[in-house]
Amino acid sequence: MAIERRHEMGEGGYCVCPKCGEKTAHSRGVPCQEERCPKCGAKLLREGSYHHRLFQEKRAKKDTEPE
């Protein structure tokens, strides 16, 4: 029996590079994490996804920490 994956992100949207910030259009049926950034080669994150929000929180925390 095949397992059907259900994603709540819907169609459209963007894939975002966590290293350089490059945005590319999301391709339906292809997870952003399987795509690579055309500029730097890093794995992409789906804009607004759980992993993207975690990345943003981590970056914000790092930016507010005193050196």
Image (cartoon, grey):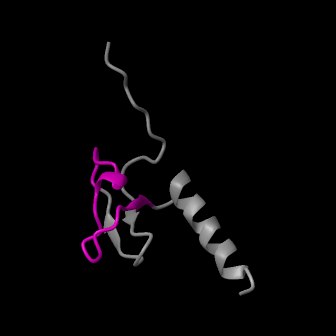
- Give the magenta-colored segment's residue range: 27-46
Could you say where residue 6 lies in the image, as x and y percent from the top left? 43, 33
Q: Residue at x 58, y 60 (%)?
A: 53
Left or right of 32 in this view: 62: right
Q: Residue at x 55, y 64 (%)?
A: 55
Could you say where residue 23 lies in the image, as x and y percent from the top left? 36, 72
Could you say where residue 26 lies in the image, as x and y percent from the top left? 32, 58
In the displayed structure, would residue 66 be above or below residue 60?
Answer: below
Question: Which residue sits furthest right?
Answer: 66
Asked where in the image residue 7 lies, by quadrant, the reply is: top left
Q: Residue at x 32, y 12 (%)?
A: 1
In the displayed structure, would residue 41 be above or below residue 53?
Answer: below
Q: Residue at x 24, y 72 (%)?
A: 38
Left or right of 59 in this view: 15: left
Out of 62 and 46, give the one closest to the viewer: 62
Asked where in the image residue 58 lies, by quadrant, the reply is: bottom right
In the displayed structure, would residue 41 be above or below residue 34?
Answer: below
Q: Quadrant of the C terminus?
A: bottom right
